[in-house]
Amino acid sequence: MSKSKQPTMEELAERIIYSDRYSDDKFEYRHVILPKAMLKYIPKSYFSPDDSGLLRILEENEWRGIGITQSLGWEHFEVHAPEPHILLFRRPLPAKR
């Protein structure tokens, strides 16, 4: 019997789910849902130092480096604590004229 092949980071990145965008009067938001299996491939330095198992707030080069693709202007600002594979992003809305 052969062992089932573990997915690669690239294969997992293809399974990232991006929510529809929603907004308030200042920001546009979206949730990015990582495949749970992806968490074991993410560098330990990307996790909070308190051993909670939560990702810390990632810099743009870090979240892009793990396969999240979005247009310019998005910032990672929160992790959904009950589900650490769900990241919240936002970007400022354009100024109204």
Image (cartoon, helix red, strand yellow):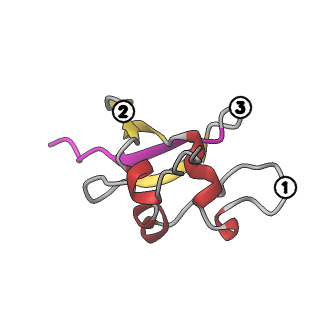
Residue 56 locus on image (x, y percent)? 66, 57
Which residue type carries mark 1?
A: Asp
- Crowding near the residue tagged with mark 3, few <14, some 14–19, many ≥20 C-alpha atoms within 10 Å: few
Q: Earlier in the sequence, mark 3 or mark 1?
A: 1
**Circles 2 and 1 in contact, beta carbons < 8 Å:** no
Point out the image quarter for the C terminus.
Answer: top left
Depth check: 82 or 41 in front?
41
Secondary structure beneath dot 2 equals loop
How far apart are labels 3 and 1 at the CA level? 14 Å
Residue 51 among magenta residues: no
**Which quarter of the picture shows residue 4?**
top right
Q: Callout 2 environment at 10 Å: few (<14), some (14 to 19), or many (20+)?
A: few
Quadrant the N terminus occupies: top right
Which secondary structure lies at badge 3? Answer: loop
Question: What residue type is disc 2 on?
Answer: Asp
Q: Can I make out residue 57 in this image?
A: no
Q: Which residues are magenta?
A: 84-97
Q: Which residue is mark 2?
A: 25
Q: Residue at x 56, y 47 (%)?
A: 2
Which residue is more in the foreground, 84 or 78?
Answer: 84
Q: Residue at x 65, y 41 (%)?
A: 84
Res 51 label: 1
Looking at the rendered structure, which numbered label has been put on residue 82?
A: 3
